[in-house]
């Protein structure tokens, strides 16, 4: 069960207007005054005249906006589709969204059971005032999506999402494939195209929570698309009566936007990869989706011709959309787009891809509702088809995943989705939620937060016109030591990129035990990921496990202009500004950089980059850890950097920890989990590795400790 809590900013208005205004809430345009009948009574001649009674006029707000909207387009196919049927009624399966009385039936406003349409309805009402404004809809706060997932705490947008959710999902597709009982590339007459239906905006917006697209097993997908505060619900962005976008409000952040078409060009700094592989990083997300959709279509046609043996074409305006390519020209030609020529040769692999292709096309606002989710669906469908093509469609230049801070589909942000309740705990929320860091900087505390789909602009920025950042002063590290990088932006980064353990916490865990004594209850201490700030400041913050009696390098002072996080890394892409490095280093390959003299790892190569020196020492330490474990009878020791708790004995977590083994294993993990350690402070990392090898009895005579 998925829970979302969305504040309705229009609740009070809705309560006041529950039976008279059009759909949801909106602007003040189109208020119409309707005069009530005037009643007169003529008195007998022998009596006095009875006064004229004039009832007050009834005002219907937003009437003109609603009358001109698609919800009142009485002649449109959405309302007239059943006119030719006998009888001409809207069936139970369609009435919820295609006739006003059907929606009232579904929500129970007509006195029937809620959550189901009990009967067919005459196609005589569009979406009117009372469709959305009645006692039942005022209480409506949740929807059940076609996947069976219930989204709760929605507020006013539950009315919109009841219809704008589609009619199919991953679950629907999987059930059809399972029932067919054939292999991925076997044609089955029991399979056919599965259509999500039109304008499934809620399915796009809620991403992997709603499972509206076909999500491939083993894939990870973006979740609810979080926009800035105040613009997260349907009615925040759309006028609920005219359905038009509030374009003038978009322009506050999206400079230059004056029309709905302009939104197609929008691309923010959290989307700096080339999703469709066309080399254009300036085009809007709309066009990235357009390009990725075209690529998937090519893959589907190639698969249909090569694997199935029956060519395929698509016509988005003609049901059932996919048709046999009878002349083999790859395009819809005269006579092909008709029901009698519906594509006849469906396999499970093709059904999955075609479903996602339609998902991308039938939500025309998908680029704004949840564009990255759609791009992931398209990418995975293309990859799945390519896996069996003799000549795969070229996608080498296309990217599925964003840069780290905006990779909302990845473990750093999705780790808590399966928890009940799904929240990021206070101990993690500072760095693994969009709202955690601003709260910590403002209040000095952390609290549990809802899982987020990557960082937002507001995570680092406190103003969306000047794009200034949150101010961050001196940073306290897990050791309790405090440092100031001299840069507010650098301090901002180091609030997260500092690790979660230190010399202090490892020593506290070890206590007074002898170095080679197995300590019951002792477990591996994980520094966590990307502790670049701890490496940069080295011995000043004790992020690595520093052995007593040894001296360690402090802050790595680089040249002026390149000694803070954002001076060396792109603040949004996080990539190293390698073009700026070549002037001094004579190379644009950071792994080859070397200023220090000496053969630290003893391999005879004093010219290799510090990365190479560290890489050798890291391998030597791993061997020393395994040798130590074997020598002391602790069991096999195996390291897996991608699986918690990282150190194993067979398939079980390694449990025979001694103080010596723990301290050295901690530093091994430290050297792995800061992949840029060679540049952040290579000498500090080398010192930790050499000392760790020595600590578990390894031979260090061939090394040169800086």
Image (tube, rainbow, N blue to C red):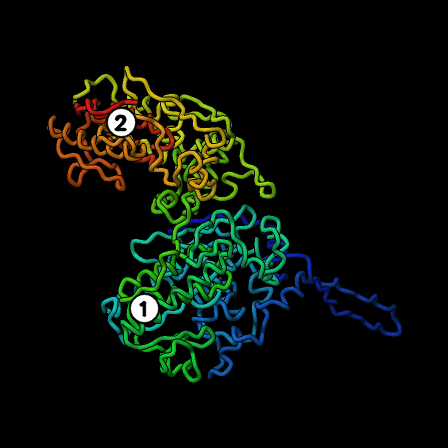
Question: Which quadrant holds the C terminus?
Answer: top left
Q: Quadrant of residue 431?
A: top left
Marks 1/2: CA distance?
A: 56 Å
Question: Whole-percent x and y of residue 83?
Answer: 51, 81
**Which sits in the foreground, 90 or 146?**
146
Q: Is residue 162 above or below residue 531?
A: below
Which residue position holds label 2? Answer: 600
Residue name at image x 83 percent, y 67 percent? 50
Which structural element holds mark 2? loop
Which residue position holds label 1? Answer: 350
* Residue 420 visible from this viewpoint: no
Within-10-Å neighbours for mark 1: few <14, some 14–19, many 20+:
many
Question: Whole-percent x and y of residue 656?
Answer: 17, 29
Q: Is residue 437 above or below residue 390?
A: above
Within-10-Å neighbours for mark 2: few <14, some 14–19, many 20+:
many
* Residue 417 visible from this viewpoint: yes
Mark 1 vs mark 2: in front: 2
Left or right: residue 419 versus residue 15 is left
**Which sits in the foreground, 407 or 397?**
397
Left or right: residue 607 versus residue 436 is left
């Amino acid at each position: 069960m998925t829970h979302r809590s969305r504040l309705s900013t229009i609740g009070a208005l809705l309560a006041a207007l529950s039976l008279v205004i059009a759909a949801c809430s909106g602007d003040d345009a189109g208020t119409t005054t309707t005069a009530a009948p005037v009643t007169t009574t003529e008195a007998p001649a022998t009596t006095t005249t009875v006064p004229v009674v004039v009832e007050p006029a009834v005002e219907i707000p937003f009437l003109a906006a609603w009358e001109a909207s698609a919800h009142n387009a009485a002649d449109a196919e959405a309302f007239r589709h059943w006119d030719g049927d006998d009888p001409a009624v809207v069936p139970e399966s369609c009435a919820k969204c295609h006739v006003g009385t059907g929606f009232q039936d579904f929500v129970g406003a007509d006195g029937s059971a809620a959550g189901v349409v009990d009967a067919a309805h005459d196609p005589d009402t569009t979406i009117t005032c009372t469709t959305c404004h009645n006692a039942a809809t005022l209480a409506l706060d949740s929807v059940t999506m076609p996947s069976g997932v219930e989204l709760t705490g929605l507020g006013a947008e539950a009315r919109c999402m009841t219809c704008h959710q589609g009619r199919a999902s991953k679950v629907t597709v999987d059930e059809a494939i399972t029932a067919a009982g054939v292999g991925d590339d076997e044609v089955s007459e029991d399979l056919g195209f599965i259509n999500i239906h039109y304008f499934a905006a809620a399915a796009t917006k809620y991403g992997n929570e709603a499972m509206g697209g076909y999500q491939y097993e083993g894939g990870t997908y973006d979740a609810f698309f979080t926009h800035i505060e105040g613009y997260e619900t349907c009615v925040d962005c759309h006028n609920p009566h005219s359905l038009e976008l509030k374009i003038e409000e978009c322009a506050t952040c999206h400079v230059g936007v004056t029309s709905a078409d302009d939104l197609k060009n929008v691309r923010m700094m959290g989307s700096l990869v080339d999703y469709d592989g066309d080399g254009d990083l300036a085009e809007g997300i709309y066009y990235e989706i357009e390009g990725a959709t075209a690529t998937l279509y090519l893959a589907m046609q190639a698969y249909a011709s090569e694997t199935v043996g029956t060519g395929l074409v698509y016509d988005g305006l003609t049901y059932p959309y996919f048709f046999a390519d009878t002349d083999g020209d790859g395009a819809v030609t005269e006579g092909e787009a008709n029901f009698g020529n519906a594509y006849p040769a469906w396999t499970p692999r093709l059904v999955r891809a075609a479903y996602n292709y339609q998902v991308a096309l039938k939500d025309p606002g998908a680029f704004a509702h949840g564009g990255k989710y759609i791009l992931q669906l398209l990418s995975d469908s293309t990859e799945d088809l390519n896996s069996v093509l003799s000549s795969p469609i070229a996608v080498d230049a296309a990217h599925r995943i964003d840069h780290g801070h905006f990779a909302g589909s990845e473990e750093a942000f999705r780790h808590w989705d399966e928890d009940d309740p799904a929240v990021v705990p206070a101990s993690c929320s500072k760095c693994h939620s969009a709202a955690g860091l601003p709260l910590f900087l403002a209040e000095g505390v952390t609290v549990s937060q809802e899982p987020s789909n990557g960082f937002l602009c507001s995570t680092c920025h406190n103003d969306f016109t000047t794009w200034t950042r949150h101010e961050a002063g001196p940073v306290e590290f897990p050791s309790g030591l405090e440092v100031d990088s001299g840069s507010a932006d650098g301090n901002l980064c180091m609030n997260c990129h500092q690790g979660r353990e230190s010399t202090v916490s490892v020593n506290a865990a070890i206590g007074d035990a002898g170095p080679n004594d197995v300590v019951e209850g002792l477990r591996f201490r994980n520094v966590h990921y990307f502790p670049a700030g701890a490496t940069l400041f080295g011995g000043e913050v004790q992020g690595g496990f520093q052995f007593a009696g040894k001296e360690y390098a402090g802050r790595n002072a680089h040249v002026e202009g390149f000694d803070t996080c954002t001076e060396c890394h792109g603040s949004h892409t996080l990539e190293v500004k390698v073009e700026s490095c070549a002037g001094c280093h004579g190379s644009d390959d950071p792994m080859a950089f070397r200023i220090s003299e000496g053969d630290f790892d003893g391999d005879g190569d004093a010219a290799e980059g510090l990365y190479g020196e560290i890489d050798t020492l890291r391998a030597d330490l791993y061997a020393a850890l395994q040798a130590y474990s074997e020598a002391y009878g602790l069991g096999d020791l195996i390291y897996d950097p991608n699986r918690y708790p990282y150190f194993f004995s067979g398939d079980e977590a390694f449990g025979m920890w001694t103080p010596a083994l723990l301290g050295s294993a901690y530093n091994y993990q430290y050297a792995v989990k800061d992949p840029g350690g060679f540049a952040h402070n290579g000498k500090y990392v080398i010192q930790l590795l050499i000392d760790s090898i020595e600590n578990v009895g390894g031979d260090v005579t061939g090394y040169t400790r800086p």
